[in-house]
Amino acid sequence: MLVIKAMNGLPALIDKLYRRCINALLITTITFSPVFANNVSQPNSNHETNNTTNIALQHALNNSSLPLINDVIKVYEPRKFNPIWSNGFTYNNDAHALYKAILNSRKLGLNPSDYDLDIIKYFLESTIDDQTILSKSDITFTHAYVKLANHINENPVSYDLTDEYALFENNSFLTEIKNHPAYNNNIGIVAVAPHQNQDPYTRLLNAIETYRLLNDDFEPIILQKKSLAIGDASPEVIKVKNRLSKLGDYKNSTISNEIYDEELAIAISNFQLRHGLDADGVLGKRTVKEINQSFESRITQLEVNLHRAKQISDLGESRYILVNVPDYMLYVIENGKMIYEARVVVGKKENKTPVLTSQISELVLNPYWNVPTSITKKEIIPKLHEDPEYLINNGMKVISKINNKNTIIDSSIIDWKNVDLENAPLRIRQDPGKNNALGRIKFMFPNNYSVYLHDTPSRNLFSQNYRAFSHGCVRVENPFEFAKVLMSGTENWDSEKFDYYAKRNKTKVLRFENPIPIHITYMTAWADEHGVINFRPDIYKRDSQIADNLYNTAQ
């Protein structure tokens, strides 16, 4: 087990971000120093470091401004301020092992550059030629060590140690690595979970390990026609069966038949479902593109999503709403189980739905729509130039503040070509009704992006596979069903009264006695509660940026 222990006194910001992380194991095939053997003594230079080294280390510690310097000092105190990562002249194997562990921290969704990877690499490639360099490098290594520990595991480290080896034997993510089969069998890097706690993060770690075991010697599929379906014959069918057999979608062990049969169609449908495609069982252009993705690229996609999965693995809430933007889906989770799901429409590429956490505090039946200034300028005014009656025909009015009161004014008196909407006290508001852009209901939660969940008159969009059409808000397919699921957990809930208010054209605000947490996330890869691995297109092109950060700093 390579369990990393976190530190007491963790800064509040880091603590907030990482307290929800589960225990994880990072297993690397590295060379081990004698420090791991209890019956082996360290060189005398580490036991009896000269007084100059001790003084230099204490001086460097006292003058350091590193964020976790107090934790670093606690590591050195029981060791009488002897260097940890060298014998005073050369860096030991543990220093090199730490570097490799940091290098591979991206396997857990972390960014190696956050742990001074380049600086540590520079030190390892340099010569220790004076005590000042020795002190600075040793403190840098130790700071990276405790910071990485903080970010991976929530259990505290004990600093009340007298044995020099205890840093590694009791508190290090390098501990017991020498006994792990992965080291003895030389199988490289393996990510596993220490407990059978099947939260999203653990499941994703298991998914990564599954893909690492796959052989990527694959000849890409090239269709000679637009698509293949049941009854068609093609040499490509054999390649498809072989690929889907490795992925677990195709169950038949016989793959030599070139006929596209019903069993293959079922396998294709299953693959399509896992990749967010229309599950029609037909091998078309988009399906071929997903099948042709290399296993290496899929591993990258899974790794990129580790940090996202980590954030939702232990939300600590018995009931909450989860919206996954690339999946175009909304879920209500209760006691760890999904009790409701609905399709959603999310923001366009130019109006991205933000990732956020908040609480739904109220819902509004038959809402007005106060048109954002940006939409007024880009969409409404151009339509007014084409049709001066556009506002009237769409139930819209111009509202102005006069004597601190909202007053409806005649839109025909406004020079729409030259109006300065940024400074003029004007806004357009759409009345409640079936054509209102927000539909018949909206769900409000505090946020800095002016987004919310709402109904829509554009019902046809929910039948489409690609559903990024909004201005940033999230449109819910069956909003009244969704509302009743949320309200059912409220005391004094009256379904008949709710229906009564909903049928009227008058605006009615209903507040939740206990606001319901909502988390809007961006997961392009995950494993569900059954272990089924899913992938979705990176509609906002966020994965590539994260992958660049993870991999470029880890080279």
Image: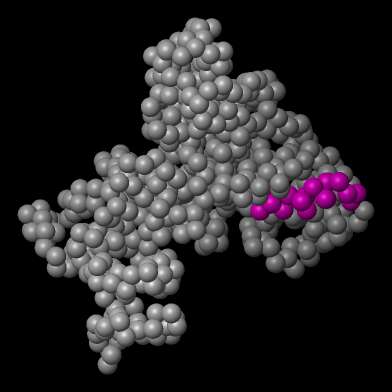
Residue drawn at x 72%, y 39% is: 100
**372 over 524 or under it: above or below:** below
Q: Pick the quarter of the image with the C terminus.
A: top right
For the residue pair 7 and 415, the one nearer the viewer reads as 415
User: Does residue 192 show up?
Assistant: no
Task: List x then y, in percent, for residue 441.
Answer: 23, 59
**Quarter of the rendering containing residue 389:** bottom left
For the residue pair 207 and 381, the one nearer the viewer reads as 381
Point out the stretch of residues depicted in magenta.
110-128
For the residue pair 15 and 272, the one nearer the viewer reads as 272
Residue drawn at x 39%, y 83% is: 415
Task: List x then y, in percent, for residue 248.
Answer: 47, 20
Determine whether, in the image, residue 395 is placed left or right of residue 312: left
Q: How is the image coloured?
A: one colour
**178 over 475 or under it: above or below:** above
**99 over 275 or under it: above or below:** below
Instruction: Kindly give the residue lying farthest to the bottom in the view shown.
Output: 403
Magenta stretch, main secondary structure class: helix
Q: Pick the quarter of the image with the N terminus.
A: top right
Task: List x then y, in percent, for residue 177.
Answer: 65, 31
